[in-house]
Amino acid sequence: MEPSTSSSSAVFQFDARVRYSEVDHRGLLTLPKLIDYFQDCSTFQSEALGVGMLWLKEHRRAWVLTHWQIVVERYPRLAEPITVGTFASSFKGLTATRYFFLKDATGEILAKANSSWALLDLEKGRPTRPAPEDTDVYGVHDPLPMPEEDRRVRMPDTLDALDPITVLRHQIDTNEHVNNGQYVQMALELLPRDIEPARVRVDYKRAAVLGDTIYPKIAREEGRSVIALCSADDQPYAIVEFS
């Protein structure tokens, strides 16, 4: 079904069914594919509003994700009908806040997310304050209720180094950077197979590109696992927390 706006002009949503290519060995939607749905939804909204990839390219701008907070109540099963939605809740200073939701056929929320974004000036290579032309078209909507969280993922005192990872072509997006969801996929691969995270938080620090080597480090504490995906000089590309 084609994406369409909901009854609230600020909320964008589309209907889908969980595909075979999106499920794990148990027949449930995987966490990385859930993130893909969320990212696709915000992309669809931007395209529908006329401020999508081509518009951003012409204006030498790009929205970059800086933080995820994801809460999963249930992972939907193969072929299950779902509705994916998103909306912006605020544009303050250099930060835009956007929420996402995944619902089942009855309207029950299966997963939801809070996210922070920055608008990058591609000419200057740094974040810039969004102008009204960048934001007014989205409108704003009241936030979804989310668990309270620290502003950033708390780093453990000690992490164990794991085998390095080389960035491959399938992990690169249209900005020539590693796609946001791919960092979560990398981190998830470092956990036992049947771990099913109900809470996920990610801090994005810098962008890895094709051919980069990523050096993962992991710490397991009571109630959570933290994976830092770092560069050769020990600076994190992304820090992922599963709980």
Image (cartoon, rainbow, N blue to C red):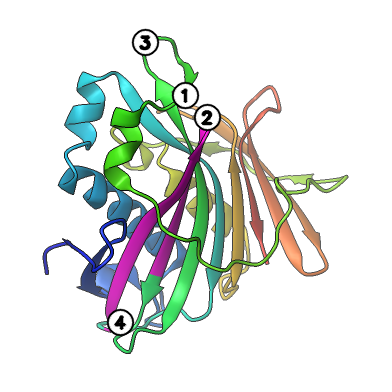
Label 1 with label 2: CB-CB less than 8 Å: yes
Q: Amino acid at mark 4?
A: Leu
Q: Which residue is mark 2?
A: 94
Q: Dot 4 lies on which element?
A: loop
Q: Magenta region's main secondary structure? A: strand
Q: Amino acid at mark 1?
A: Arg
Is 215 situated left or right of 13 in this image?
right
Q: Disc 1 versus disc 2: distance between alpha carbons?
A: 5 Å
Viewer-proximal residue, 60 or 209? 60
- Per the rendered image, the range of residues in magenta is 80-101
Q: Which residue is mark 3?
A: 123
Label 2 with label 4: CB-CB less than 8 Å: no
Residue 193, x across and y down, in percent: 56, 71
Q: Which residue is mark 1?
A: 129
Neighbour class for label 1 at 10 Å: few (<14), some, many (≥20)? some
Q: Which residue is mark 4?
A: 78
Q: In which quadrant will I find the C terminus?
A: bottom right
* Position of 23 relative to 47 (above/below): below
- The label on residue 150 is none
The tag earlier along the polypeptide, 2 or 4, is 4
Residue at left offset 27%, top offset 68%: 21
The tag earlier along the polypeptide, 2 or 3, is 2
Q: Disc 4 versus disc 3: distance between alpha carbons?
A: 44 Å
**Which image quarter: residue 241?**
bottom right
Q: Dot 1 lies on which element?
A: loop
Q: Amino acid at mark 3?
A: Glu
Residue 229, x across and y down, in percent: 62, 40
Residue at left offset 62%, top offset 68%: 192
Name the residue furthest left. Answer: 2
